[in-house]
Amino acid sequence: MRKELGKIESVKFGLGGYQDCCIGIHFTLGGKGWGTITGSSAWDANIIECRKDCKWTEKDRSEQYDKIVRYISALLNDAKVNSIDKLINIPIEATFDGMQLVSWRILKEVI
């Protein structure tokens, strides 16, 4: 595991993820010599139908939506901002296992 310092280079709330069928928050994170994309999203209710043969339910989707909004609320609180556009250039620490992003956090201690 290695830790890298960087910043939030871009952020958007909307469609993205697998074939742009997921609604949620999507980030580009980067630092000196590295960059990656990440986010928190769920199947969009207007694009992906929950059929009887699905292994998930509308209740599951609603719970995912709830988690996404709570995640955004926590990020805004950590960064001491009131909208996602103000997250751009906020300093972060990213943890990688090889080339894979494991986790990241806002550096609250420098804000």
Image (cartoon, helix red, strand yellow):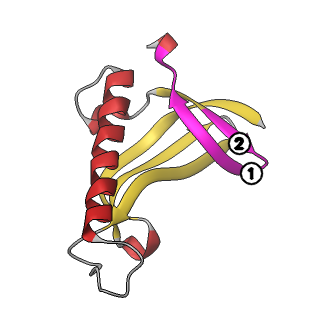
Q: Residue at x 59, y 50 (%)?
A: 36
Q: Does residue 43 appear left or right of residue 97 in this picture?
A: left
Q: Residue at x 35, y 31 (%)?
A: 74
Asked if the residues shown at circle 1 and circle 2 are in contact, with their CB atoms under 8 angstroms apart, the answer is yes
Where residue 65 sits, quadrant-wise, is bottom left
The image quadrant where one finds the C terminus is top left
Give the dominant element type of the magenta stretch: helix, strand or loop: strand
Judging by the rendered image, the residue that carries numbered circle 1 is: 99
Q: Which mark is residue 66?
A: none
Is 69 located above or below residue 75 in the figure? below
What amino acid does circle 1 point to?
Answer: Met
What amino acid does circle 2 point to?
Answer: Phe
Residue 104 placement (x, y as % from top left)? 56, 36
Residue 86 placement (x, y as % from top left)? 30, 31
Is 49 located above or below residue 23 in the figure? below
Where residue 15 sits, quadrant-wise, is bottom left
